[in-house]
Image (tube, rainbow, N blue to C red):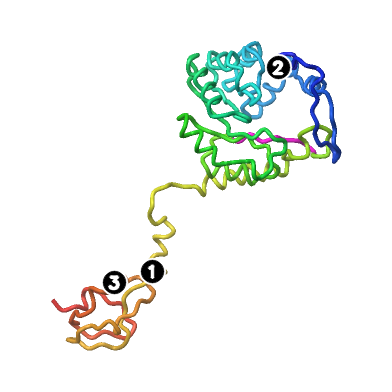
Amino acid sequence: RTHEFLADRALTYTYTSRGREVTESQWDLFSRCELSSPALAELCAHARARGVQFFATPTSARGVAELAELGCDLVKNGSDCLGHLPLVRAMAASGMRTVLSTGMATLAEIDEAVRAFRGAGGRELVLLACTSSYPTPDGEVHLRRIPALAAAFGVPCGFSDHSAGTSAALGAVALGACMIEKHFTLDRALEGPDQHFSSDPREFAELVRGVRALERQLGASAIGPTAGELAARTAFRLSCVAAAPLRAGARLAADQILLRRPGDGLPPTAFDFLVGKRLARDVRAGEPLSLEHLAA
């Protein structure tokens, strides 16, 4: 609720809406977006009916309790309330998995919030790398914060994306983000502060497809040929082959050995080994060399 986090009704916020600059009271803006308890319950039921995990960003311990009563198993704390340690502790005490957004924060402030969460018995925590600029310019996204936060606090880290387009979110996944938060709108032409940089249905679907493809593409960190590469190794790799017809008894010279496809003979790494070896039988020009060609 607006009164739970805003005291000065004279505070204003300037944003772009429908291509023009708008300045309005923060109180009016946030009050207009409030959800009543029945509306929250209706949204929760609607999401569950469609297999979508429902969660919200409460601004008080009462809001945390309301989400717990709805059976939510996930709750998010906004960047503006990272320093609201009583709220962080209430989230921890609820037993719900908790997401802390870190926009505008110093490392020390994040550390204080994480300590408060853990000190209140919280177990499952996710940090979101975030820049609280709407929209966020490319140069202020700082995706490298994602692995840095994960390493600093030993928790999964995600990305709260306030940039336009999908490139930052996809880059976040490549850097290990476990969760992507992205503003969504049915139509960018709608009135409001976030519409113009939010993802519409087409872009959001494109983002989801991109994330799923990227998850597959990330694969494993183990180094070695893939199944497809194993099948192609013989055709694509090189072998040591005879540069010209060679007679049995001759000693191989370096200029009598070429490296050519396919890779079904001795590999290029055997080149030095072959130089000076005596042939046990005749070899045709272009024939892959093998150990059977060599005299004992």
Where the C terminus falls, by quadrant? bottom left
Q: Where is residue 99 in the image (x, y as percent from the top left)?
A: 57, 26
- Would you name the residue on which mark 1 appears? 237
Q: SS class of the residue under badge 1?
A: loop
* Residue depicted at x 52% and y 43%: 175
Disc 1 marks a residue whose amino acid type is Arg
Callouts 1 and 3 close, C-beta under 8 Å: no
Q: Residue 123 carries which label?
A: none
Disc 2 marks a residue whose amino acid type is Phe
- The CA distance from mark 1 to mark 3 is 11 Å
Q: Quadrant of residue 97?
A: top right
Q: Position of residue 269 (x, y in %)?
A: 29, 69
Please count the marks in the image.
3
Q: Which is closer to the viewer, label 2 or label 3? A: 2
Mark toward the start of the polypeptide (1 vs 3): 1
In this picture, residue 4 sits left or right of residue 189: left
- Would you name the residue on which mark 3 appears? 266
Disc 3 marks a residue whose amino acid type is Leu
Q: Quadrant of residue 261?
A: bottom left
Q: Residues within 10 Å of mark 2 (few under 14, many from 20)?
A: few
Identify the residue at the far left of this view. 296
- Would you name the residue on which mark 2 appears? 5
Q: Is residue 186 a member of the stretch shown in magenta?
A: yes
Give the extent of the magenta segment: 180-187
Q: Is residue 100 positioned above or below 230 on the image?
A: above
Q: Quadrant of residue 138?
A: top right
Q: Position of residue 109 (x, y in %)?
A: 56, 24
Q: Is residue 243 positioned above or below 141 on the image?
A: below
Mark toward the start of the polypeptide (2 vs 3): 2
